[in-house]
Every structure is written in C-alpha cells, then in structure tokens.
Amino acid sequence: MEAPEASGPSARSVAKLIDGIHTEVVVNIFSDRIFVIITQTGKMGTLLQASSDHGDVDVRVLMGRRDDPLLVVYAQQLVESLRVRTESPILLAIALKDEGRTSATFQ
C-alpha cells in the first residue's frame, strides 16, 4: 500500500504598481501558518510574526529592522484583514522603498 503523496503549500503571487512603484506580493499557505512577502526591492526585508488571540494582535520582529514601527502597523493591518479567514499565525516579510511607505501601500 502506497502512502498518500504529501502536498506542499498553496502559493499565490501578484505584482502591481502601487503609487508608481512595482510591488510584489507572494502568499504561501502552509498547514500551520501563512507566509506573506511584500516587496518593492526584490528582497525579503524585515521578518515579522503576527498572530491574533481573542481580538488582540501580537506582532514580533524576528529579523531585520526593529526600529521601524510602521512595519508593525502594516503587520497588524494584515492580521486584522485576514482574521475572518484564518486563525493561523502569519509570517510577514516586508521590504519597502522609502517612497513606497505610504498609507496607500496597505489599502
């Protein structure tokens, strides 16, 4: 009897111009978490972990810029927008150009 073939993560990607800046978004859905990459530089940038517990959003910077509160705000917004769809923790890699750090980027 053969073992069932293991399935890998589900992945989707999209690229758009946001405020005139090429922005790529890649979403990988694993069985235990969601990994989202948002980049305007072609690099992964700062890695954050975000989770929601009873309405409270907890965001931790795992690697990268710890002195950038805007990245934490972006991660919180993403968790809040996905909360209705998943309770899985989210790993988020964000690399934005300085001119791409506007409120329009995450709307």
Image (cartoon, rainbow, N blue to C red):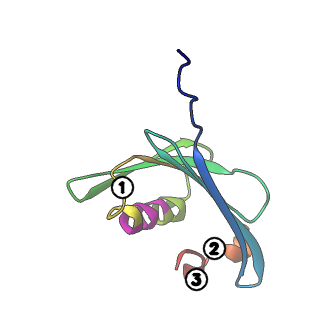
Tell which tag, 3 or 2, sits nearer the viewer.
Answer: 3
Per the image, label 3 sits on a secondary structure element best described as: helix
Residue 79 painted magenta:
yes
Element carrying mark 2: loop
Work out how far the residue at label 3 is from the one at label 1, CA to CA, in angstroms: 24 Å
Name the main secondary structure of what is drawn in magenta.
helix
User: Residue 33: horizontal and vertical position, in percent?
Assistant: 46, 43
Of mark 1 and mark 2, the one earlier in the sequence is 1
Q: In the visual, does 10 lie left or right of 81?
A: right
Q: Is residue 49 left or right of residue 39?
A: left
Q: Residue type at mark 3?
A: Ala
Front-most of residues 38 and 12:
12
Picture disc at residue 67: none
Q: Which residues are magenta?
A: 75-81
Query: For mark 3, what is the residue?
Result: 104
Counting residues from the start of the chain, the first of labels 3 and 1 encountered is 1
The outermost residue toward the front is 1
In the depicted structure, whether residue 50 falls above or below residue 40: above
Where on the picture, by quarter, is residue 26?
A: bottom right
The residue to which callout 2 is attached is 101
Q: Amino acid at mark 2?
A: Arg
Residue at 43%, 39% in the rendered image: 32
Name the residue beneath numbered marker 1.
86
Q: Is residue 82 magenta?
A: no
Q: Nearer the viewer, mark 1 or mark 2?
A: 1
Report the amino acid beneath label 1.
Answer: Thr
In the image, is residue 12 above or below residue 9? Answer: below
